[in-house]
């Protein structure tokens, strides 16, 4: 590459999204890119020309290793929806003006479904207006719902602590609870995914039957479960907020069901909702997840060097014993705004659990450890000035 590049982060944070930025930086340095910028708060910050020079933080091996171990989004995130091109050309032209101002040849964007939509919109505008700049997507989402790719960086970390909170209609996060079962743990008694209609009356019957035979019962329920009329359980009796992309901000499903159980049975209940602290903590990130996040960032740069644009790097599983995974670049139009659900064959016939097929798929993603770097008894992280 003859020009500079910029990388941004968008959407919910994860424990490994910073590793993808490290991968972008490492590949760009290897190619001799003059300056590697980082967007401050994603494309929203970029529109205000807010960037940092990543070389000030990462120009040695220690900086890169610290970034890989730093939780959440080091560059800052956003949930900014790019407007439709027609009638908003000024917004797009502003992005290209900023890229030209800083001699930015390629923009890399790490995120999930909505972030890939941003990559699609920008690459489409560039193609329609003969712009030379290129745009590449770097996958990131604990929801694991991007299509084409075998899995998404960030999901492996969430699998380690069975992250059951989901913002969408796919049950990948809640499915992670299936991995809790082992020699020292009997696992969940029931797991409910949004891929199945949720029957509250049947749920209460299941709870009563379990409570009659067990001293304690553990149930995992996705925030995205819906009843037969299409309503989310968490919005029954109340309204929920909607974000810039039109996604309902779901929360409170566990609390609502726990209160219902307590009121109707007298059983002692406790609702536990995992959220940002759980999803972004790097001390429990799997080495597999960290390495693959780094790889997709690295390979996005290598694909751009080959002249590719309007694409996302996918992870392609090509071995099971031992587990092996490669990458490729795939057309962003087949990915943006498409949601992948948990396959039907991985959900048990009673709709309350996951099969061995799912466990075989998910288990390799949680393997390996990357220990934090400790200073004075506390983990050391990279901090943006």
Image (tube, rainbow, N blue to C red):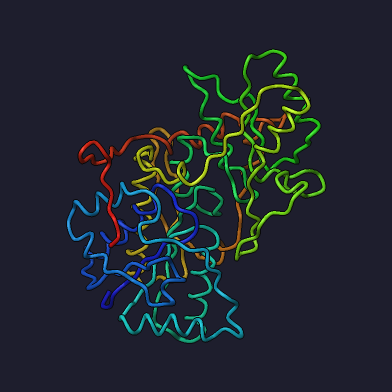
> Residue visible at 40% across and 70% down?
308
> In this picture, is 337 found above or below 316?
below
Count of numbered circles in the view: 0
Foreground: 290 or 13? Answer: 13
Q: Is residue 266 above or below residue 340?
A: above
In the rendered view of the protein, which quadrant contains the C terminus?
A: bottom left
Residue 221 at x, y percent in the picture: 64, 36
Image-based side of 247 in relation to 90, left or right: right
Q: Residue at horizontal 49%, vertical 21%?
A: 182
Can you give x and y, in whole percent of width and height, for residue 84 in the image?
Answer: 60, 77
Q: Is residue 272 shown to the viewer in this render?
A: yes
Question: For residue 374, which quarter of the picture?
Answer: top left
Against 139, is 180 above or below?
Answer: above
Q: Whole-percent x and y of residue 86?
A: 61, 84
* Residue sitting at the far left: 60
Q: Residue at x 51, y 82 (%)?
A: 91
Q: Is residue 329 visible?
A: no
The image quadrant that residue 50 belongs to is: bottom left
* Quadrant of the drawing holding the N terminus: bottom left
Q: Quadrant of residue 156?
A: top left
Is 177 on the left-hand or right-hand side of 213?
left
Residue 373, how many percent across, how many down? 24, 41
At x 65%, y 49%, the residue is: 169
Nearer to the camera, 315 or 60: 60
Residue 73 vertical placement versus 207 (above, below): below
């Amino acid at each position: 590459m003859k020009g500079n590049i910029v990388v941004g982060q968008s959407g919910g944070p994860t424990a490994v999204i910073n590793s993808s930025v490290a991968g972008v930086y490492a590949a760009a340095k290897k190619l001799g890119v003059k300056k590697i910028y980082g967007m401050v708060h994603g494309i929203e910050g970029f529109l205000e020309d807010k960037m940092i020079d990543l070389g000030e933080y990462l120009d040695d091996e220690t900086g890169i290793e610290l970034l890989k171990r730093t939780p959440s989004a080091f560059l800052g995130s956003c949930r900014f929806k790019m407007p439709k091109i027609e009638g908003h050309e000024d917004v797009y032209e502003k992005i290209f003006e900023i890229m030209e101002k800083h001699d930015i040849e390629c923009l890399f964007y790490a995120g999930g479904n909505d972030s890939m939509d941003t990559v699609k919109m920008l690459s489409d505008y560039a193609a329609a207006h003969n712009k030379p700049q290129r745009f590449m997507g770097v996958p990131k989402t604990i929801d694991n719902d991007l299509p084409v790719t075998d899995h998404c960086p960030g999901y492996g970390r969430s699998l380690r602590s069975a992250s059951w909170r989901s913002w969408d209609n796919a049950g990948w996060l809640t499915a992670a609870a299936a991995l809790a079962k082992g020699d020292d743990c009997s696992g969940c008694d029931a797991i409910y995914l949004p891929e199945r209609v949720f029957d509250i009356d049947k749920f209460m019957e299941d709870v009563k039957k379990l409570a009659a035979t067990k001293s304690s019962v553990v149930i995992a329920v996705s925030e995205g479960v819906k009843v037969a009329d299409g309503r989310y359980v968490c919005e029954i009796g109340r309204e929920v907020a909607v974000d810039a992309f039109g996604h309902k901000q779901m929360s409170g499903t566990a609390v609502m069901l726990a209160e219902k159980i307590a009121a109707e049975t007298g059983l002692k209940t406790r609702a536990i909702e995992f959220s940002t602290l759980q999803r972004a903590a790097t001390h429990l990130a799997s080495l597999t997840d960290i390495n693959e996040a780094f790889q997709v960032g690295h390979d996005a740069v290598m694909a751009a060097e080959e002249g590719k644009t309007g694409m996302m790097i996918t992870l392609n599983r090509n071995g099971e014993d031992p587990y092996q995974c490669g990458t490729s670049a795939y057309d962003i139009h087949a990915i943006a705004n498409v949601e992948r659900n948990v396959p039907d064959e991985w959900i048990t016939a009673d709709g309350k659990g996951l099969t061995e097929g799912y466990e075989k798929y998910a288990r390799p993603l949680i393997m390996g450890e990357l220990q934090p770097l400790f200073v004075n008894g506390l983990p050391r992280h990279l901090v943006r000035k």
